[in-house]
Image: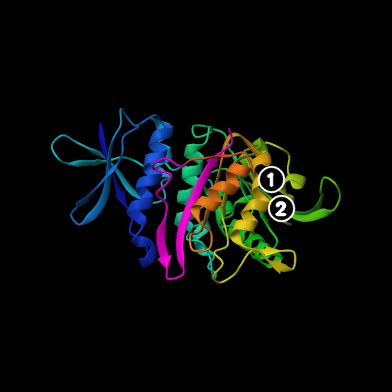
């Protein structure tokens, strides 16, 4: 059976140039999770970009995964007479789809790119077909874009950062969004003791779509942690996360902070990679994006391999590099815990 995916137009003119490239990688990764080895091909119909692919059928799980594709505008079955028959998408978003998009700030990662990277990490993991909520960690979360993407997909999220102001804005924004959408939730602030001494400040959200689901325990959680990602192993239990997704500082508008000094992206990744490998479940995937002008793909891969992770270097996982602006060429590396 042949299918076609219409790619949605993107408001960011710079990102729009890379949509087809990244959408193809995301689609191929999802198809592979359902044992479809077909390589999608791009074709213009009526001047609109489509990705075509062959698959034995459209199982519910595959349809749901494709409906959540970051660039999917329309899914169709390509009939033998050259016509396209639209399929009813079934994304099953837990939170409003616009949640990662609304909060705007200088230096924010494109939310569609974050969703793309998260979808690729989930599809490349051993948990791609799981029907249960997974746990997604962002150890450099900033104002929470990755966490909000994870909540939209119905997963639990953990966000960690040293920037207390950024975490406060993420906290305030989510609380306001939950009230605006009249979603049942509970917020609590506290302190968590670290293994080996010390403590970090935390904010926890427990959310449900309805009061009945809240009573039945059908909830999702978000924990925001104010702390150093280099101490990740002291904050979380081993094997407690299914997927890790982070966007490393690009070293242009701001650089990663380490204590009171400024660190390099390479040093930051080397410091946190060991903790990431420790808290990641076997079969889980860590995905990090970065500026190729300040951190090479080879060095990023080496840092993850040194932590005991297996870098996914074969196609399509070697094709994420794309131009963002004069000082930024964004790339990404995915690595699986064996």
Q: Which colour scheme is used?
A: rainbow
Residue 141 relative to residue 195: left or right: left
Q: Is residue 187 visible?
A: no
The reply to whether dot 1 and dot 2 touch (C-beta < 8 Å) is yes
Residue 275 - label: 1
Residue 80 relative to residue 109: left or right: left
Give the residues in magenta. Answer: 313-338
Residue appearing at x 49%, y 53% in the figure: 297
Residue appearing at x 73%, y 43% in the figure: 236
Does residue 76 sit above or below 327 in this rendering? above
Pick whichever of labels 1 and 2 is earlier in the sequence.
Answer: 2
The local secondary structure at tag 1 comes to helix
- Residue 183 in percent (x, y) is at 60, 51
- Residue 162 in percent (x, y) is at 70, 61
Residue identified by numbered label 2: 230
Quadrant for the C terminus in the image:
top right
Alpha carbon distance from label 1 to label 2: 7 Å
Tell me if mark 2 has few (under 14), some (14-19) or many (20+) residues whose alpha carbon lies within 10 angstroms of its own.
some
- Residue 26 in percent (x, y) is at 40, 45
- Residue 135 in percent (x, y) is at 61, 41
Q: For residue 167, what is the image quadrant? A: bottom right
Q: Which of 29 and 294 is in front in this view?
A: 294
Does residue 292 sit above or below 80 in this rendering? below
Tell me if mark 1 has few (under 14), some (14-19) or many (20+) residues whose alpha carbon lies within 10 angstroms of its own.
many
In magenta segment, residue 325: yes
Quadrant for the N terminus in the image:
top left
Q: Which of 178 and 170 is in front in this view?
A: 170
Residue 12 relative to residue 295: left or right: left
In magenta segment, residue 27: no
Q: For residue 242, what is the image quadrant? A: top right
């Amino acid at each position: 059976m042949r299918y076609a995916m219409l790619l949605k137009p993107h408001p960011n003119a710079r990102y729009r140039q890379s949509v087809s490239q990244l959408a193809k990688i995301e689609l191929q990764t999802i198809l592979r999770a359902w044992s479809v080895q077909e390589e999608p091909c791009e074709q213009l119909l009526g001047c609109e970009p489509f990705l075509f692919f062959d698959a034995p059928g459209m199982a519910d799980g595959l349809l749901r995964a494709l409906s959540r594709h970051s660039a999917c505008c329309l899914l169709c079955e390509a009939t033998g007479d050259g016509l396209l028959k639209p399929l009813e998408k079934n994304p099953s978003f837990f939170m409003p789809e616009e949640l990662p998009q609304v909060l705007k700030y200088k230096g924010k990662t494109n939310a569609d790119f974050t969703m793309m990277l998260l979808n690729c990490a989930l599809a490349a993991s051993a948990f791609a077909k799981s029907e249960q909520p997974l746990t997604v960690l962002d150890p450099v979360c900033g104002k929470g874009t990755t966490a909000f993407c994870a909540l939209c997909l119905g997963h639990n999220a953990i966000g960690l950062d040293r920037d207390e102001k950024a975490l406060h804005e993420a906290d305030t924004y989510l609380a306001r969004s939950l009230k605006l959408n009249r979603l049942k939730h509970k917020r609590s602030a506290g302190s968590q003791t670290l293994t080996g001494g010390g403590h970090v400040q935390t904010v926890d959200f427990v959310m449900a779509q309805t009061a009945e689901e809240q009573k039945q325990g059908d909830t999702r959680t978000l924990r925001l942690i104010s702390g150093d990602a280099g101490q990740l192993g002291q904050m979380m239990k081993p094997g407690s996360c299914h997927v890790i997704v982070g966007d490393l500082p690009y070293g242009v508008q701001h650089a990663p902070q380490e204590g009171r000094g400024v660190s390099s992206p390479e040093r930051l990744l080397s410091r946190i990679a060991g903790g990431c490998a420790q808290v990641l479940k076997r079969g889980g995937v860590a995905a990090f994006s970065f500026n190729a002008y300040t951190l090479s793909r080879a060095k990023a891969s080496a840092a993850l391999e040194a932590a005991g992770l297996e870098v996914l270097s074969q196609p399509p996982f070697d094709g994420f590099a794309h131009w963002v602006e004069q000082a930024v060429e964004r790339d990404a590396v995915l690595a699986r815990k064996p």
